[in-house]
Image: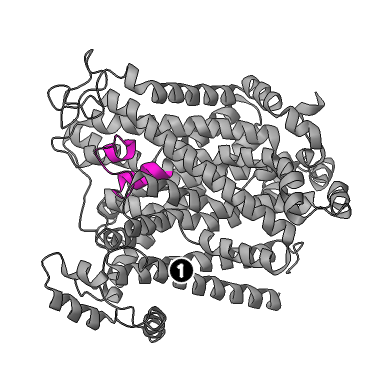
Amino acid sequence: MRAYIARRLLLSALVLALISVGVFWLLRLGPGDIAQIALGQGASEEQVETMREHLGLNEPIHLQYFRWMGQLFRGDLGRSAISGTPVASEFTSRLPVTAELLIITLLVTVAVGIPAGVVSALYRNSLTDYAVRVAATIGLSVPVFWVATLVILLPNQWWGYSPPLGRTVGFFDDPSGNLRQFVPPAVILGTAAASVIMRLTRSALLEVLRQDYIRTARSKGLRERIVIWRHALRNSLVPVVTVLGLQVAGLLGGTVIIEQIFSLRGLGNYIYQSIVIKDFAVVQTMALYVALVVVLMNLIVDIAYAWLNPRIRYG
Amino acid sequence: MEAAQPGPLGEAQTVGRARRGLGRRLLFPILRNPLGLSGLLLVLTLVVVGSLAPFIAPFGENESAGVPFQDPSWGHPFGTDQFGRDIMSRVMFGARISLAVGFLSVIGGTLVGTTIGMVSGYVGGWVDNLIQRAGDTVMAFPALILLLIIISVLGPSINNVVIVIGVSIVPGVSRVIRGAVLAEKQNQYIEAAQATGASSVRILFRHLAPNVAPLAIVIATTLLAGAILAEAALSFLGLGVPPPNPSWGADVNLARNAFPIHIWWAFFPGLAIALTVLGFNFLGDALRDILDPRLRGATR
């Protein structure tokens, strides 16, 4: 087990290093000069040159990369080339917003996806099963940004109501105001993930219910409820937990859209704004952060998987 | 009957038959599956509307057709937008963009991914390891954020959207194909081909390719829905198909920011996306259930 974790850690570090090189190189591929973008169109040749010098853009690209890495390892996340704001201060003020959004989203995903999958599997091929499965496919098909747009626009048109936009309300200052702000986007964001979890729970549970030990449990005379909840569901949730971890990557991407529409000042919104204004110093650091979260989630999932299911080889 | 219910590795083992009867083996089960059938109908409708848009749309995609912000009426069944354009006509023309981006990116990405996956699985060793780790790296990153970054570097255009979405599906495709090739490699006909002195390239493209082709087709079908959603999301965020092209995603975004609120402008293009993606999802699910249980989890 320890060797397995060590191997996984090493591999994760490698993936992170590759992503950092990839993103860094990618951002410098395009046409257009970062210094020029930072200064805007009106800048003189001289100002651009000073800016290039200031941002270290005249150095060879690998030196620039190592300078960036050096900064990161000293704990310096850098600052925006356009506004000059340190990335770290933006990051700490925005992290709670995205964290709360993701936590509520995951709760919704689990609370809807797993029971729906169980019901669907237990009443296999019934009308309920079909209804749940069709609902899940619809959940996977409807674009998040469309539902979110309608949720903002419709109440506004009908009753002149708009959800509290802009400034985020702290949960401990005003719980109901906070939830009114976070629950609608979280539900919309979680719909697709819940659909994936539902489908997976259904197929995993059906798989387990076919196993011999379930027949044994039933023939011992155990009540059906105990067979399902204690014997079957537990085992079938192993793959569900793994996929739930993997969903986090998709949800992180989704925060970019949903925070934009609901005007939540979280990390997704920060990443999007920085990409749009080509604030590459911010984009590269935030991209690495996103990759770090995903790689960590994968690592946790892999270890949890090995721990939950001793049958897999740690190879 | 036997052909309709292939085993888990049915494709791998039925060498010649898999190729000959593929159309018939796929089509009939889909027609019998109610969801598959409705998916097929949705997709066909879309293809017909998209390809005939210049002839059946009442107005041009950018033609000023009347007073702005009209509600649906006989003259304008979906109403008009801020610029007085007929929303129904724009939705019809938008089908062309969605389909073109979806099909081109998925076909390109599947071809490249299949080739890479076959090489990775067949050659093995450090080549395989390198390719798969590179794939892990790309897949570790949230696709939407990656797409946004690349588009912002390259600049938004239809071509770039196709390229970028195509590239983003390569690692997933190559991984599934690699797995299939690893299994396929064990068969005796590969050993026989090697014994006759066939080159690796010949074995890959003459012997292995026909046997992984059905799998590649199914993967491609299941990826279409995602590709169309991705185009819509990118365009919605202003980093996809640029206006005044009638992209559905871009139009929802325009409607979101318009004042006064004109709900129909946001409603109909978004509904078109939802129905299109639903159609491809139904079709893809039906195909996958019919052909290949191995694919579970190939698409996110």
Q: Is residue B195 left or right of residue A60?
A: right
The stretch drawn in magenta includes residue B235: yes
Compared with residue A250, is residue A143 higher up or lower down, i.e. above or below? Answer: above
Q: Quadrant of residue A77?
A: bottom left
| Residue B248 visible in the picture | yes
Which segment did they paint magenta? B230-252
Residue type of the residue flagged with mark 1: Gly
- Residue at (47% x, 58% y) in the render: A249
Compared with residue A156, is residue A249 higher up or lower down, i.e. above or below? Answer: below
- Residue at (79% x, 31% y) in the render: B17
The stretch drawn in magenta includes residue A248: no
Image location (x, y in percent) of residue A146: 33, 39
Parent chain of label 1: A
- Quadrant for the N terminus of chain A in the image: bottom right
Image location (x, y in percent) of residue A194: 50, 45
| Residue A82 visible in the picture | no
Please give the residue where the numbered disc 1 appears in the rendered image: A22
- Residue in the foreground of this view, choosing between A200 and B69: B69
- Residue in the foreground of this view, choosing between B248 and B281: B248
Image location (x, y in percent) of residue A285: 36, 72
Q: Is residue A236 left or right of residue B52?
A: right
Q: Quadrant of residue A174?
A: bottom left
- Quadrant for the C terminus of chain A in the image: bottom right
